[in-house]
Image (cartoon, rainbow, N blue to C red):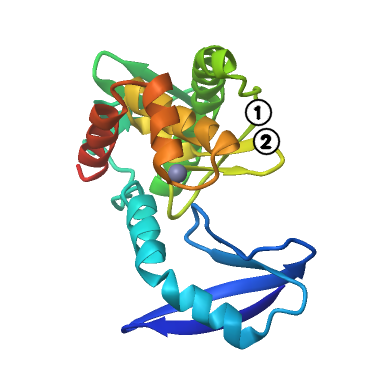
Amino acid sequence: MQQDSVYWGRTRILYTYRFSRRKTLALSVHPDLAVTVIAPEGTSLEAIRDKVKKRGAWIRQAWREYQLYLPHQPARSYVNGETHRYLGRQYRLKTQQGEADSVKCLRGYMWVTTCQEPNPERVQELLEGWYRDHARKVFYERLEICCSRAALVGIATPTLRIQKLAKRWGSCSEGGRILLNLELIKAPKDCIDYVITHELCHLREKHHGPRFWRLLEKLMPDYEDRRKLLNLFADV
Ligand SMILES: [Zn+2]
């Protein structure tokens, strides 16, 4: 893999390229906004640069679509009274000192109990652990549901990883693995299903071309509404 960049108008397009035995040049934009080129052996750098420049408008459009679901993460201070979300609902944070460390989500409140006098660092640590546990449970549950539908069009169940991602709700890798942003546990289940199904479709169609959107619509006819909800929710 080598790196290069070209200018498309005033937009700098940074990309990596490599050569292979294929006959035509393949250009891809990935969910993390990376641009990659696989070129036939013997292609000159000049020819690669020309091709990237020619696809400039398409690359920018692909970036925009990916950026549509960059999660918005407001700063949190982990003090009493602050609101935190879980599956789209708001809960007010209540911190207290008690016998053992625990987190409980109850009747509109997120109760965080710490052995020591509560401090924001410890509250954050406990709360994130709680989110992680629940994300694991909920995401696997939703994945199973989404996969049962995707199986009808022959998409195999991928493995799942959950991670904090700075720039996106989810991604998928060629090895059939889906990565979901831990933050997604704060969004409604309808949105979680949208991100999972979107990534499942990428296992079949790598790019956001017409075939991709047709496949997504087939699996999830109301995906537009869910996507809007996710964007709306992300700005709150
Ligand atoms: Zn996508």
- The vertical placement of 30 against 226, above or below, is below
Q: Which quarter of the picture shows residue 4?
A: bottom right
Q: Marks 2 and 1, how far apart in space? A: 5 Å
Residue 28, x across and y down, in percent: 54, 59
Pointer 2 residue: 176
- The vertical placement of 21 against 232, above or below, is below
Q: Which quarter of the picture shows residue 8?
A: bottom left
Q: Residue furthest front?
A: 23
Residue contact between numbered discs 2 and 1, judged by CB atoms under 8 Å: yes
- The vertical placement of 58 against 6, above or below, is above
Q: Quadrant of the C terminus?
A: top left
Local crowd size for mark 1, using a 10 Å CA cut-off: few (<14), some (14–19), many (≥20) = some
Numbered mark located on residue 158 in the image: 1
Q: Quadrant of the N terminus?
A: bottom right
Q: Nearer the viewer, residue 24 or 236?
A: 24
Q: As drawn, is 231 to the left or to the right of 99?
A: left
Q: Amino acid at mark 2?
A: Gly
Residue 169, x across and y down, in percent: 43, 42
| Ligand 1 position by quadrant | top left
Local crowd size for mark 2, using a 10 Å CA cut-off: few (<14), some (14–19), many (≥20) = some
The residue located at (67%, 36%) in the rendering is 176
